[in-house]
Amino acid sequence: MRNEKIYENKKEDNKALKRFIPIIIISMIVGGIGGAISEIAETGLAQIISEGITSLLSVTVPYVNFVLTFVIGGIAVWLYKKARNLYREWNGEDEEHIEQIEMQLGYSMWATSILMILAFFFFAAGLSNVIISEKDNSVGIISFLMNSILFMLGFILAISFVVIIQQKIVNFEKEINPEKKGSVFDTKFSQKWVDSCDEAERFTMYQCAYKSYQATSKTCVVLLVFTIFGMMIWDIGVLPTAMVTIIWLIQTSSYCLESIRLAKKSSRNKK
């Protein structure tokens, strides 16, 4: 039986290897072509891109979080209200109706999460823009102060909106499912929420978490390759590569350590 399994494993590995080798070769060719093109375009291209992004951010940063809150936040509120209306029409028995409500709330929560991430990005971009503006003698003090106040207010508005709408979504979920526990304002909300979920819901969470783990791992590979090219061609330094590596290490280590912990726990329970 053991020899059969070894043979089966070798056969499976050989089959996968035949597909893997062409992928590696194609990746090397594409990487080489990309590197050559980047080397040719190195002179002036990186500076043009950098100046273009900086110029765009300098114009948009003071106002972008207001716009994002209005647009993405408006979508989140519309989805939330749509779920509310569907709930009022529910007869208390139709499971498909409840699934539609849950779907609308899921999309609404997704929208608020996107808004939060973008708000933090433009907050960082705003800080950078403020520092650059402060060092630029051509920028007037009034303009500098106004832009600084606007970008701070936009960030506060976006984050406040995210917290409020997520709190409403969670409380609505608790109306639909009275067994659910936890408050958005509680530092242990995630744990309390998971503890109040049934086995089917937890299994769905685990599937989503593993899918996210795979997507993040693939993204880290792409970003690592990009930052290595950037380090060699555009002289962006080793810090971006180090940051991607740290994220990848934390994600992989936390996954593996938790897997080991759960395996030990399962083994003790069997005894």
Image (cartoon, rainbow, N blue to C red):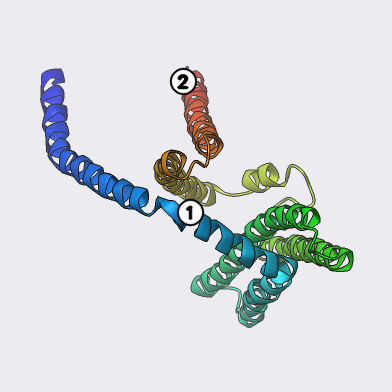
**What's the distance in space between the residues labelled 2 and 1, CA to CA?**
55 Å
Residue located at (82% from left, 62% from top): 148
Image: 36 above or below 129: above
Residue located at (46% from left, 39% from top): 231
Q: Which mark is residue 46?
A: 1
Q: State left or right for residue 191 relative to residue 218.
A: right
Residue at the far top: name it.
271
Where residue 40 appears, x then y in whole percent? 34, 51
Residue 158 in view here: yes
Nearer to us in this view, 127 or 104: 127
Mark 2 vs 1, N-terminal side: 1
Nearer to us in this view, 57 or 40: 40
Work out which quarter of the rendered image holds the N terminus and state it. Answer: top left
Where residue 82 appears, x then y in whole percent? 63, 79
Asked where in the image residue 60 lies, by quadrant, the reply is: bottom right
Nearer to us in this view, 150 or 271: 150
Where residue 51 appears, x then y in whole percent? 58, 60
Which residue type carries mark 2?
Ser
Which residue type carries mark 1?
Ala
Residue located at (62% from left, 60% from top): 54
Asked where in the image residue 147 lies, by quadrant, the reply is: bottom right
Mark 1 surroundings: few (<14), some (14-19) or many (≥20) residues within 10 A:
some
Regarding mark 2 in the picture, which secondary structure is present there?
helix
Q: Which mark is residue 267?
A: 2
Regarding mark 1 in the picture, which secondary structure is present there?
helix
